[in-house]
Amino acid sequence: MTLQRVLPFSKELLKQVVAPGDLVIDATAGNGYDTLFLAELVGPSGRVVAFDIQEAAIESTRQRVKDHSHVELVLGSHSELDRFADRPASAVVFNLGYLPKGDHSIITKPDSTLEAITKSLDILKEGGLVLLAIYYGHEGGAEERDAVLSFVSGLPQKKYDVLRYGFINQQNSPPFLIAIEKKRS
């Protein structure tokens, strides 16, 4: 067995819960890699909604998913994701921090992130996942990390399983993954 890095591990989790025809949400489109992966998982009968507050991120994602008409791109906050859910989602994916190769002063913030996580849990189908890749090695990152950890640690265990996955012996604030599974009743 080889230990997987955060992003490959999150893809393995997504493969277990996302099926053709599902609704999935990329709460932070970034450069579109997760959006493309999700579009391929749900296939043309599914629906992907991807959010970002930066036009550059939306444009990068648009180019990456240009052959996937079942992807909707939203220039706006992930805190509005519930408005775009036409059915329960099988997965909601977040990469918290800043846009790689973008303006590092534009970051995800605790208030809108916690609102988006709450709304994600509301629209998540049973057995679905909310995945949060947390990058915190920048100004404001530790505040968001701590707010997210405090919030998810308080989720009721009868309703959710919460996993923290990451490497603890690496320098320079290594990212880690939080996976929240909505239990089946």
Image (cartoon, rainbow, N blue to C red):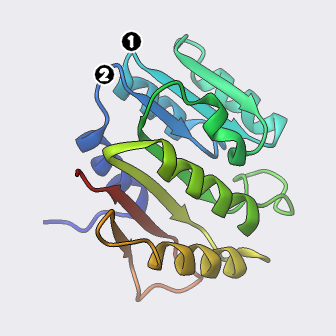
Callout 2 touching callout 1 (CB < 8 Å) = yes
In this view, 84 is above or below 30: above
Q: Residue at x 44, y 67 (%)?
A: 178
In the depicted view, which residue is nearer to us: 158 or 94? 158
Q: Residue at x 76, y 45 (%)?
A: 77
Residue 162 in which image quadrant = bottom left
Left or right: 185, with 177 as reference point: left
Left or right: 88, with 110 as reference point: left
Can residue 108 be seen here? The reply is no
Q: Amino acid at mark 1?
A: Ser
Residue tagged by mark 2?
A: 20
In the depicted view, which residue is nearer to us: 154 or 65? 154
Q: Residues within 10 Å of mark 1 (few under 14, many from 20)?
A: few
Residue tagged by mark 1?
A: 45
Q: Position of residue 53 (x, y in %)?
A: 80, 43
Q: Residue at x 64, y 63 (%)?
A: 114
Left or right: 108, with 15 as reference point: right
Q: Amino acid at mark 2?
A: Pro
Q: Residues within 10 Å of mark 2 (few under 14, many from 20)?
A: some
Q: Earlier in the sequence, mark 2 or mark 1?
A: 2
